[in-house]
Structures are given as structure tokens and as C-alpha cells.
Image (cartoon, helix red, strand yellow):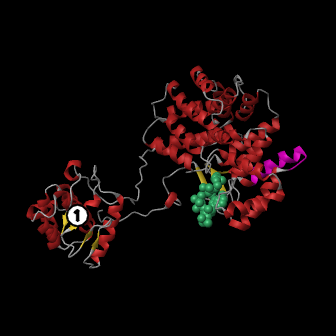
């Protein structure tokens, strides 16, 4: 490896600022702003369409803009017939998120603006995809159950239209209003995993559908959007408040994660939980037999005590969606129904000020190594100072394996500490002074065959790459030169050692 300084590394990119955005601010102390507006105010006063416009355009819409946007969304809800046919062709047990991902990907082929990344074209595509995502979810769900799609209703609000096209019945106004608030709460959350992955795709200047498809694929995972489906399974499995304590302790003892708890950014509580919890309480109190909310509250108490972890939005969203009559398998799709607005806003922002997102990785793999032609060493016996080294090479392959390299690194450390005996593993022991000059002598005397020389050069390379006295380096260079088959190794060692390949010529 070269000796360049290592950039700082944060596992899982925790705490890393990966870009600038003017869309959303997550306050680790349980706060959330969309374009500067507090989520609690928006949940109380604004519809999903107003919030979608706000995210996309930066300001809340005027009355005219809002009417126009609502009309636009309701005009864009129909799906191209081939997309409907594709949904009908899926196996009945297809997960709704898989149907949605495939549907959005397929939609791209029908959009005349597909390859125009301008701001205006991206806004047009955003309106189309936001509208159509709703229809893909509901039509896909129905198609998998052998039901015909319910045609979207013109000039119906997004949440109400979703429930209508899911069930075939006009929803109760309170239910539609509550789903509307759920959509507001889920609409954006800065660089969460799905938004970030959508931005990565957008940063290659791929199209908006490709980036939204990426977002859906990322959202599906149970550590992200899939958590609201898993949370419902948790609540069903627990079944009653009396079971919570033992259930949690058992899971924690097995080091399992409890879905609906914990968050990468919030450590003192999720800003969306109080509103979502309140919606759940409201709905459950109407049912006359509160069951799920008390389980959640007990879970919160136990998780706080046992792990100092707070509930996240997905725990209570699971309850709210269940009480709205939505099957748990659709929970992540409801998340997508809303978050698609955030994705689109971020994709547009990314492409308006684009710079390719391309971080580095910290390499922890096998150090540099080389292969030799198979014929050079197959079934050859290697000797060095009388010790047989054959076991390193298989009968039909001479590729140096990982374990050899690990040994070689161990060995290089011991060499640096001045040890004179090198353990080469698997029975092969090289005794005496570990020095290329000795190998060189063996090579010249015909005791060390070229394949063995190549092997030793590979083993020696980590030492060359770190710190080597000039004389020792020249010795190694001569050895490699006479080994003949190992110029590549010598070149890389020279480059890493001093950046000066010409040293080989001085040999
Ligand atoms: N249940 C049990 N323990 C949890 C936990 C959970 N839901 N979430 C985190 N922890 C524990 C971890 O095991 C770890 O414990 P340890 O230090 O004893 O090993 C500690 O809390 C820190 O967790 P970590 O995995 O570093 O947090 P993270 O920031 O990497 O992960 C989540 C954040 C969201 C992925 C994680 O909390 C999680 O998996 N939650 C469940 C899934 C979920 O609800 N996702 C929706 C998020 S909105």
C-alpha cells in the first residue's frame, strides 16, 4: 500500500455530512423541519399535497397552485395498460414493495421527459410518479388477489383516493384525514438510507425513475421502511401488555433487534412519534377496546429501561395503519406513497447542483499479490536452502492464497523485529537468514526454481512496501531480475517503496 494519509472513516457513515440540502432538517433532539416549517405545524394545518408542493418547490403553494397541483395529480393517476398487465402477471405472493419497484421502473419507458434532467422536466416527472405510485400500489395489491383495479377518482385528495382505489369504497372522512397526516409525517427525512441511495443514482445523471426505483429498493429493508410492517408482527406476537416484559427480555438476551425502536440520528426521541401516537390513541379509543397502544406504551417503558432506546415513527405507524384497515404487508408501501415526494425533491436538488457522489472505501482485504502462469509451477518441487516449499502450490493452480498472505504479513513483522527464522506455514520452513541475497544464491545455484522465487518475492513484498534499507532493496531487485518471471512484483514494490521505478535499472 502507498503511504498516503488515511481519510477519516465512520462505519455506516454515522455522523458523516454527505452533502448539502435545503429541503429538510432533522434535529437529533427530536425536531424535524421541512423547508423550515415544523413538522408538528404542518401535520396540524397542511395537507399532503401542500407538503409535497412545499418539498418540491421550496414554498407552500398559493390557493391556485394547490388547486392546480391537486388537479394535476388526479389527472396523472392512470397507469399505462402494459404496466397494469405486468401487475396482473405477478405471482399472488409478490410483496407489494417488489410490485411497486418493478412498476415504477417500467413506468420510465412511458415518460416522454425521461432523459431530460432539466428542473422543469424533473418537476413534471415528479408529479407523474407521485400520482402513479398510488395506483401501482393499489392496483398491484388488488391484482395479486384477483381483483380488478378501481379507477382513480378525479379531483379526490391523494389519501382519500388511495383508500378508495385500495378498497373500492369511498373512505370515511376521518380515516382519509388521518392517512393524510401519516403521509405528511413520512414525506421526508433528509439523508435517510433510501433518499441517499436515490441521490447517489441521481448524481450519475441517470433518470428520475431510476433514482426513485433505487429509493423503493432501499426502503424495503426491515431496518428502514420495512420496519413498520415488522413492528405490526411484533405487536401481534406479543398479543397483550402482560407479555411485553418477558418478550422483550428474551429477545434482548438473544441480541435481537426490536423493530420500531432505535434511530441513527434521534437519540432522545423521534420527532414524529408524539403525533403518530396521538393518531393511534384517537383511532383506538373509537374502537372501544384499546389493545395495541397499551402494548406500545409498555414496550416503550421496557425498552427505555433495558436499552435506553426510544420508539421510532414506525412502531406507532403500524398501529395507525392497522386501525385504518390497511394490511401490514402494505405498510412499507404507504411509507413509499409519501416518501416518493421527498425522493423527488432530493433528486431534483441533486441534479440542479450535481456532483457525482463517489466516496472511498477503507481497504481491509488481502495485500497486493500476483499470480503465475499455471504451467510454471504445477507439480514442481520448490527448494530453498534444502527446505521443501511445495505445499504452497496446488497441483493445478499457483495462485497465492489468502492464508499465505496473512502468514507473509505475520512473517514480515517478525522479520522487522529481527527474527532470523521465517515460518512459511504448512510444513515449509525457511531457516537461516531471511534475506533476498540468500534466495538469490539459491536461485543461481539452481536450488530455487523460478516458481519458488516468485512465491518468495510475493512473500517479501509487504516488507518492501513498508520500509527497506537501500542495499536490501537492491538485493531484492537483483533477485527479482534473475527470477525473471517477477517483473510485475518488482515494479509494484518499487512504485510503493519510493515511487521510483527507474531503480530497477540500477540493479
Ligand atoms: N433493538 C434492540 N437493540 C437495538 C435496537 C433495537 N431496535 N436498535 C439499536 N439497538 C442497539 C444495538 O444492538 C446496539 O447495541 P450494542 O451497543 O449493545 O451492540 C446499540 O443499540 C446501537 O445500535 P446501532 O446498531 O449502532 O444503531 P444504528 O444507528 O446503527 O441503527 C437502526 C439504527 C434504526 C438501524 C437500529 O436502531 C435498528 O435496527 N432499529 C430497528 C429497525 C427499525 O425500527 N428501523 C426503523 C428506523 S426509523
Q: Give the residue drawn at x 78%, y 59%.
A: 244
Task: Indicate the position of residue 489 as horizontal and vertical percent values.
Answer: 21, 58
Left or right: 258 in relation to 372: right
Q: Give the residue drawn at x 45%, y 45%.
A: 353
Question: Local crowd at mark 1 within 10 Å, few (<14), some, or many (≥20)?
Answer: many
Task: Indicate the position of residue 90 as horizontal and vertical percent values.
Answer: 61, 28
Q: Element type at marker 1?
A: helix
Left or right: 4 in relation to 111: left
Is 212 situated above or below 389?
Answer: above
Is 354 situated above or below 467?
Answer: above
The answer to whether any part of residue 266 appears in the image is no
Q: Quadrant of residue 174?
A: top right
Magenta residues: mostly which secondary structure? helix
- How many discs mark residues in the rendered view? 1
Q: Give the residue drawn at x 74%, y 38%.
A: 327
Which residues are the magenta region? 274-290
Amino acid at each position: 500500500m502507498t503511504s498516503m494519509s488515511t481519510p477519516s472513516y465512520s462505519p455506516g457513515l454515522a455522523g458523516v455530512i454527505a452533502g448539502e440540502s435545503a429541503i429538510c432538517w432533522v434535529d437529533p433532539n427530536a425536531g424535524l423541519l421541512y423547508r423550515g416549517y415544523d413538522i408538528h405545524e404542518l401535520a396540524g394545518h397542511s395537507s399532503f399535497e401542500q407538503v409535497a408542493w412545499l418539498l418540491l418547490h421550496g414554498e407552500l403553494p398559493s390557493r391556485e397552485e394547490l388547486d392546480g397541483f391537486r388537479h394535476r395529480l388526479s389527472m396523472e393517476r392512470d397507469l399505462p395498460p402494459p404496466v397494469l398487465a405486468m401487475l396482473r402477471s405477478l405471482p399472488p405472493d409478490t410483496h407489494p414493495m417488489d410490485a411497486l419497484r418493478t412498476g415504477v421502473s417500467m413506468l420510465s419507458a412511458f415518460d416522454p421527459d425521461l432523459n431530460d434532467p432539466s428542473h422543469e422536466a424533473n418537476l413534471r416527472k415528479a408529479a407523474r410518479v407521485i400520482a402513479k405510485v398510488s395506483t401501482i400500489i393499489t392496483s398491484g395489491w388488488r391484482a395479486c388477489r384477483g381483483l380488478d383495479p378501481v379507477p382513480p377518482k378525479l379531483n379526490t385528495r391523494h389519501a382519500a383516493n388511495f383508500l378508495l382505489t385500495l378498497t373500492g369504497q369511498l373512505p370515511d372522512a376521518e380515516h382519509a384525514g388521518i392517512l393524510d397526516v401519516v403521509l405528511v409525517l413520512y414525506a421526508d427525512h433528509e439523508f435517510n438510507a433510501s433518499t441517499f441511495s436515490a441521490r447517489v443514482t441521481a448524481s450519475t445523471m441517470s433518470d428520475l425513475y431510476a433514482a426513485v426505483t433505487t429509493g423503493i429498493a432501499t426502503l424495503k429493508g426491515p431496518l428502514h421502511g420495512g420496519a413498520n410492517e415488522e413492528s405490526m408482527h411484533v405487536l401481534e406476537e406479543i398479543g397483550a401488555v402482560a407479555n411485553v416484559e418477558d418478550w422483550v427480555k428474551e429477545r434482548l438476551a438473544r441480541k435481537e433487534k426490536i423493530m420500531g425502536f432505535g434511530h441513527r440520528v434521534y437519540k432522545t426521541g423521534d420527532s414524529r412519534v408524539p403525533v403518530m401516537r396521538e393518531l393511534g390513541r384517537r383511532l383506538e379509543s373509537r374502537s372501544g377496546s384499546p389493545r395495541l397502544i397499551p402494548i406500545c406504551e409498555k414496550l416503550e417503558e421496557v425498552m427505555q429501561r433495558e436499552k435506553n432506546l426510544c420508539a421510532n415513527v414506525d412502531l406507532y405507524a403500524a398501529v395507525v395503519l392497522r386501525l385504518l384497515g390497511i394490511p401490514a404487508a402494505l405498510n412499507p408501501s404507504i411509507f413509499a406513497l409519501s416518501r416518493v415526494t421527498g425522493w423527488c425533491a432530493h433528486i431534483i436538488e441533486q441534479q440542479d447542483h450535481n456532483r457525482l457522489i463517489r466516496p472511498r472505501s477503507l481497504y481491509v482485504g488481502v495485500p497486493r499479490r500476483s499470480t503465475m502462469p499455471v504451467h510454471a509451477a504445477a507439480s514442481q518441487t520448490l527448494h530453498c536452502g534444502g527446505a521443501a516449499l511445495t505445499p504452497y502450490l496446488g497441483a493445478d493452480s499457483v495462485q497465492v492464497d489468502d492464508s499465505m498472505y496473512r502468514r507473509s504479513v505475520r512473517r514480515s513483522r517478525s522479520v522487522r523485529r529481527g527474527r532470523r527464522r521465517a515460518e512459511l506455514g504448512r510444513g515449509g520452513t525457511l531457516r537461516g537468514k531471511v534475506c533476498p541475497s540468500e534466495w538469490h544464491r539459491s536461485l543461481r545455484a539452481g536450488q530455487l526454481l523460478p516458481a519458488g522465487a516468485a512465491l518468495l518475492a510475493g512473500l517479501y513484498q509487504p516488507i518492501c512496501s513498508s520500509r527497506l534499507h537501500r542495499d536490501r532493496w537492491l538485493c531484492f531487485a537483483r533477485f527479482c531480475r534473475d527470477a525473471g518471471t517477477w517483473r510485475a512484483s518488482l515494479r509494484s514494490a518499487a512504485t510503493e517503496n519510493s515511487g521510483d521505478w527507474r531503480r530497477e535499472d540500477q540493479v
